[in-house]
């Protein structure tokens, strides 16, 4: 429904003697946040302008803005205050959330929820091959804080996290942090454009929250998939530099669509793709600012607003206008010009971005750890259950043992049987380069020679008839 049609309905309701939608039958001040109009949140002022049939204000609104204003009015006073505090950066973090006992209990509940969750193939794959990574308390804590300690939401986002990571970076990177050296040359080139920037240690708003910048005018002809991988890396690397307090307070997102020539359909498709990827990260969006100077994109932006939840929608602010107008609009929300990554409306401040990128690369090199030992296709895994039985190395091992079973069971001496076992071990370890691995609380480890010997003897026993 267009803004003008909604305005027309309000005009007819007023002429029919209906309730005044701006004041709710009372004073305008009592229906908002008990503040004067200049101090009132931007969306609520625009909602009142709609009721007053201000043609300038109505023309600058999207249908999503109108719905957002309705959402704000329908929230409880506590929920509305929380939304305003998040958008303006004055929210506080309850002290009990930093209590070790509370965190340990929450992590335990999250792990239980993940075990009960179905349809989590990528997570199960990561959990089996990279158990140390999937159980990392720091990773689980980040998702808990991003979800305000709602274990259901946190579990769902973790499942999405591993699905998206598997899709974008493959199985070999599923169980570890993604670094710059893991990016393909085309993706690294897309990242160096500076379209996506999240540097929590250097770039924060006036209230001290990290600010993420998405500069669409610098995309150029880079493929959407490479941009998406660059975006995902930017978010994940940025979260590694955030403190627990940062994860609880959230990140401010600034989406800058100035001088963007995309069609509304292409624009909407790309934004929805980015939003779906963002849901698969341990990041809490405290506020989202969309800056745009293209009126033809108003409908697409409105669809984005209408597609998200109420909780997300009330934290979105849309700023239509020129490059300079968008900068001044952002300043009203504590985002100063000094942290804005562009030197003008068409180009990024490359020197600053390059410096921060080099600092990030240095940090990644300092924090680099040897990859966690993981099973390969020629490895034999010691253990029971479906994941072990279906592992490709175990299937190959079973087929190999089948070829020796009759010979082993007809052998007359222990020495002859030991020679057959050693022959099988030699084929697995020497010819195929495989290993015998066992799963421990600290991850996968090499099995001892005695354990490998027992594994062969266990599998080669006569099959029950």
Image: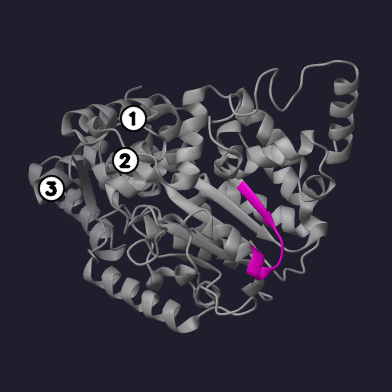
**Circles 2 and 1 in contact, beta carbons < 8 Å:** yes
- Residue at position x 65%, y 78% in the image: 346
List the residue tagged with mark 3.
Answer: 418
Q: Looking at the image, is 327 positioned above or below residue 220?
A: above
The one of 200 and 193 positioned closer to us in this rendering = 200
Which image quarter: residue 16?
top right
Which image quarter: residue 270?
bottom right
Q: Earlier in the sequence, mark 1 or mark 3?
A: 1
The one of 124 and 88 positioned closer to us in this rendering = 88
Q: Secondary structure at mark 2?
A: helix
Q: Earlier in the sequence, mark 2 or mark 1?
A: 1
Q: Residues within 10 Å of mark 1 (few under 14, many from 20)?
A: many
Q: Secondary structure at mark 1?
A: helix
Report the colour scheme. Answer: one colour
Q: CA distance from mark 2 to mark 1?
A: 8 Å
Q: Is residue 367 visible?
A: yes
Q: Single out the mark in the foreground, 1 or 3.
A: 1
Q: Residues within 10 Å of mark 2 (few under 14, many from 20)?
A: many
List the residue tagged with mark 1.
Answer: 110
Highlighted range, magenta: 317-325
- Residue at position x 18%, y 40% in the image: 441
Q: CA distance from mark 1 to mark 3?
A: 47 Å
Task: Determine whether, in the image, residue 290 is placed left or right of residue 179.
Answer: right
Q: Position of residue 49 (x, y in %)?
A: 75, 40
**Circles 1 and 3 in contact, beta carbons < 8 Å:** no
Q: Looking at the image, is 50 positioned above or below residue 326?
A: above
Q: Earlier in the sequence, mark 2 or mark 3?
A: 2
The one of 259 and 72 positioned closer to us in this rendering = 72
List the residue tagged with mark 2.
Answer: 140
Which image quarter: residue 200?
bottom left
Q: Position of residue 255 (x, y in %)?
A: 60, 59
Task: Determine whether, in the image, residue 278 is placed left or right of residue 66.
Answer: left
């Amino acid at each position: 429904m267009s803004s003008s049609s909604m305005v027309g309905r309000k005009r007819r309701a007023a002429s029919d003697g209906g309730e005044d939608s701006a004041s709710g039958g009372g004073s305008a001040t009592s229906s908002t946040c008990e503040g004067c109009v200049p101090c009132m949140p931007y969306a609520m002022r625009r909602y009142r302008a709609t009721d007053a049939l201000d043609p300038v204000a109505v023309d600058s609104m999207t249908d999503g803005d109108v719905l957002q204003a309705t959402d704000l009015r329908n929230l409880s006073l506590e929920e509305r205050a929380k939304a305003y505090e998040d958008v303006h950066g004055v929210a506080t973090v309850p002290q009990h959330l930093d209590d070790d006992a509370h965190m340990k209990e929450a992590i335990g509940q999250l792990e239980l929820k993940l075990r009960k969750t179905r349809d989590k193939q990528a997570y199960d794959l990561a959990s089996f091959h990279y158990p140390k990574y999937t159980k990392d308390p720091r990773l689980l804590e980040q998702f808990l804080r991003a979800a305000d300690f709602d274990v259901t939401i946190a579990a769902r986002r973790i499942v999405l996290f591993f699905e998206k990571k598997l899709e974008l970076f493959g199985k070999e990177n599923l169980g570890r942090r993604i670094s710059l050296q893991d990016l393909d040359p085309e993706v690294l080139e897309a990242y160096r454009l500076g379209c996506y920037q999240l540097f929590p240690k250097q770039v924060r708003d006036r209230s001290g929250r990290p600010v993420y910048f998405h500069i669409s005018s610098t995309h150029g002809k880079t493929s959407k998939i490479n941009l998406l991988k660059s975006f995902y890396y930017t978010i994940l690397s940025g979260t590694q530099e955030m403190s627990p307090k940062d994860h609880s307070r959230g990140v401010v997102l600034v989406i800058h669509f100035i001088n963007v020539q995309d069609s509304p359909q292409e624009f909407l498709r790309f934004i929805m793709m980015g939003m779906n990827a963002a849901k698969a990260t341990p990041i809490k969006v405290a506020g989202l600012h969309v800056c745009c100077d293209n009126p033809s994109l108003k409908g697409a932006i409105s669809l984005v607003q209408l597609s998200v939840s109420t909780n997300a929608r009330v934290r979105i602010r849309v700023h239509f206008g020129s490059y300079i107008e968008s900068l001044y609009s952002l300043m009203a929300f504590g985002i100063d010009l000094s942290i804005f990554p562009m030197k003008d409306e068409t180009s990024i401040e490359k020197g600053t971005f390059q410096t921060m990128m080099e600092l990030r690369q240095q940090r990644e090199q300092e924090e680099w750890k040897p990859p966690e030992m993981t099973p390969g296709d020629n490895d034999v895994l010691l253990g029971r259950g479906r994941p072990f039985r279906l592992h490709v190395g175990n299937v190959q091992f079973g087929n190999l043992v089948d070829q020796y079973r009759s010979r082993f069971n007809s052998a007359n001496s222990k020495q002859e049987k030991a020679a057959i076992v050693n022959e099988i071990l030699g084929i697995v370890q020497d010819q195929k380069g495989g290993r015998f691995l066992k799963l421990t609380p600290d991850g996968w480890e090499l099995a001892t020679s005695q354990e490998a010997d027992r594994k062969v003897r266990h599998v080669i026993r006569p099959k029950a008839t």
